[in-house]
Image (spheres, grey):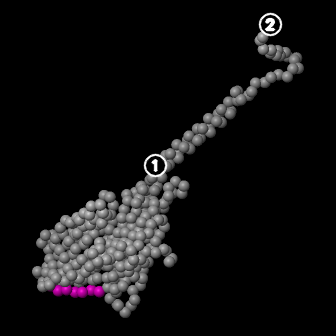
Amino acid sequence: MDLSPPHCAYYANSRQKRIKKSPRWEDDEGVAATVGTIMTILVFLTFMGVFTSQIVPAWMSDNESAHMTEVIQQMVSLKSDIDGLIADFANELMAPTPIMVPVMLSATGIPVFAAPTSGILSFLPEAIDARPSLNTSYTVDLTFDDGHTGGTLRLYCPNRYYVEQHVVYESGAVIINQSDGEFILSGIPLVVKEYSGVLVMQMTQVSLVGLNKTVGGTGAKAVNANLLYASTIEYYGDASTEVSIEVSTKHGHAWANYFRKTLNSTGADLTYGVDFVVPEPIFYDNPGRTNDYYIVTATIYGVGVFDHTKASVQLSIGELGV
């Protein structure tokens, strides 16, 4: 008995319906389309990988760097405007003009790929026994302590791609602080000159008052400043008198370097160790706390005339247009 499966025989003149094989195993165009799609996806993923790992960090680093430049310009503009108000306050019959400077908190992002880098803007007003502070005393026959001033406006930028920075307006100076160092970008109004053999020193202290406030996020915030008063007292001494400036701050090395550089480059031709001294900052550590600080002292000897200006500025942080 033959159990083999039946199969059809075809003849040239046969009218029987032929059985056709499925074309899917013989169509090369379908296989090529699938392979082409896979290759396109792989190329796209490779490009996206290069873009996110190489181009996005470089792009964001440029954005954050540009933001830091913008913020520094805004802080210096705020200091310049306040110094201008103090200089113009000689005419006390005229009310000082309030000023407003926008401060950009965040760097721009990249749509879809990277969010903006947020910042934190904080204002700490002057308070007794609070830091930062700047104290000045003038020794003649008696010691005149003419000034406790303080207060700080600080923008912290925790940059993700560029180096993180603090931009600080403190005691009338603009300070840049980052992981690899710190320096005073724009110092306090301070000059020492010699007239007819007499050493004359002029200095302005700025005190910031207002309400303690901290804001964070993206966009810009308005910093409003209003000069409350400014006054100058002139002291007279002789070759044995001295001016002592003491700064309590988190940025001790920046202040010490600033005093050394400024006093070395005055028109009075001062000599370090003879006409003035600025010892290394003294560090005060509070274990487990964040309020560590430095004490910086600058002493200038033989000051015959000391023109000392103190100013009080009311500062506030608000929304733009409010």
Location of mark 1 (residue): 54
User: Is tag 1's residue or tag 2's residue first in the polypeptide sequence?
Assistant: 2
Magenta stretch, residue numbers: 231-237
As shown in the figure, which amino acid type bears the numbered disc 2?
Met
Q: Which element is circle 2 on? A: loop
- The answer to if 235 sits in the magenta stretch is yes
Q: Residues within 10 Å of mark 2 (few under 14, many from 20)?
A: few
Question: Going by the picture, which residue comes out furthest to the left?
Answer: 240
Q: Is residue 11 left or right of residue 110?
A: right
As shown in the figure, which amino acid type bears the numbered disc 1?
Gln
Q: What label does residue 1 carry, if any?
A: 2
Q: Residue at x 31, y 58 (%)?
A: 180
Closer to the camera in the image, 66 or 92:
92
Q: Quadrant of the N terminus?
A: top right
Image coordinates for residue 25, horizontal then vertical, percent: 70, 27
Q: Quadrant of residue 294?
A: bottom left
Image coordinates for residue 169, horizontal then vertical, percent: 34, 72
